[in-house]
Image (cartoon, rainbow, N blue to C red):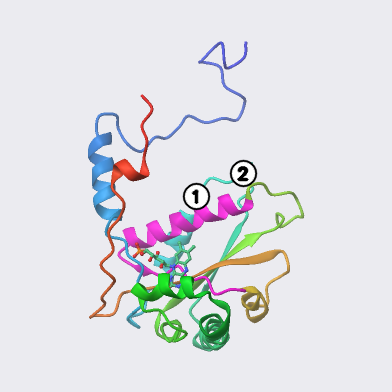
Amino acid sequence: MTPATNPNSHPEGWIPLDAHCPQGTTLLAATDFYNTIKKRRTVRSFSDKPIPKEIIEQVLLAAGTAPSGAHKQPWRFIAISNPQTKHEIRIAVEKIEREFYEDKASNRWLDDLEPFETNPDKSYIDTVPWLIVVMALRNTDDGGQVYYLNESVGIATGMLLTAAHEAGLATLTHTPSPMKFLRDILGRSENERPYMMIPLGYPSDDCHVPDLSRKPLDEICVFVE
Ligand SMILES: Cc1cc2nc3c(=O)[nH]c(=O)nc-3n(C[C@H](O)[C@H](O)[C@H](O)COP(=O)(O)O)c2cc1C
């Protein structure tokens, strides 16, 4: 009998689902989580307070639980605390950002960025205790095919940001373009495509963020019942 016709039959090697949320507490859990995650903000002003490597490891383990096309897990997280490496990255990033702000960005793009008061100064890369570079793997480490690469790495990155927030840490999703220089500085293989840079630390004592509002439910969601 196939599993479809007999619910008690399962493929060999499968395990029972270990669901973490007891039935009946779902609304409470969903509301609690929303109340936590709605406080996540992009931070651009960090403290230099150190963060133990063990905490970073847990955050990255959480990111690594993301779903991925055919479970190929096509990501690698390069976690950098070495001051020289961070400084080298800062210098390279600031050069690229200067080109962006002075030449490459359209006026419309610059206008759209104005509320965030961003500019080519990326001194927080020196300050922040950890810099995570997310790499998208073009192939698996043994040369196999990967599927839905951008979708998979995007979800893992979102889970990384969420796990960091849950741990009381602040993040910035930083996307200098192009990002190939990160592979060169970090001595990584051609198989790794730099996907995003995430400074990760505690916010500075006087950290302020732009007063943004988020779209209401009826704008982001359509129910078909
Ligand atoms: C794909 C992506 C790229 C981003 N790139 C940058 C960036 O290069 N520099 C920066 O300061 N913020 C960057 N951001 C952060 C956004 O500006 C920020 O998420 C947005 O303003 C909403 O603010 P919030 O994250 O506090 O809700 C990026 C965000 C995303 C999702």
The vertical placement of 121 against 73, above or below, is below
Q: Which quarter of the picture shows residue 19?
A: top left
Left or right: 3 as drawn, with respect to 189:
left
Q: Is residue 64 visible?
A: no
Q: Which residue is mark 2?
A: 69
Camera-side residue: 94 or 59?
94
Mark toward the viewer: 2 or 1:
2
Q: Main secondary structure of the magenta part?
A: helix
Disc 2 marks a residue whose amino acid type is Gly
* Residue 65 marker: 1
Disc 1 marks a residue whose amino acid type is Thr
Q: Position of residue 112 (x, y in %)?
A: 41, 70
Q: Position of residue 21 (x, y in %)?
A: 32, 36
Image quadrant, ligand 1? bottom left
The vertical placement of 197 against 121, above or below, is above
- Contact flag, marks 2 and 1 (Cβ < 8 Å): no
Q: Is residue 142 visible?
A: yes
Residue under the point 72% across and 55% down? 139
* Disc 2 to disc 1, C-alpha distance: 13 Å
> What span is colored magenta in the figure?
149-178
Q: Around disc 1, counting alpha carbons within 10 Å, would you say few (fewer than 14), some (14 to 19), or many (20 or more)?
A: few
Is residue 171 one of those drawn in magenta? yes
Q: Exactly how many numbered labels are in the figure?
A: 2
Residue under the point 50% across and 49% down? 65
Looking at the figure, which quarter contains the C terminus?
top left
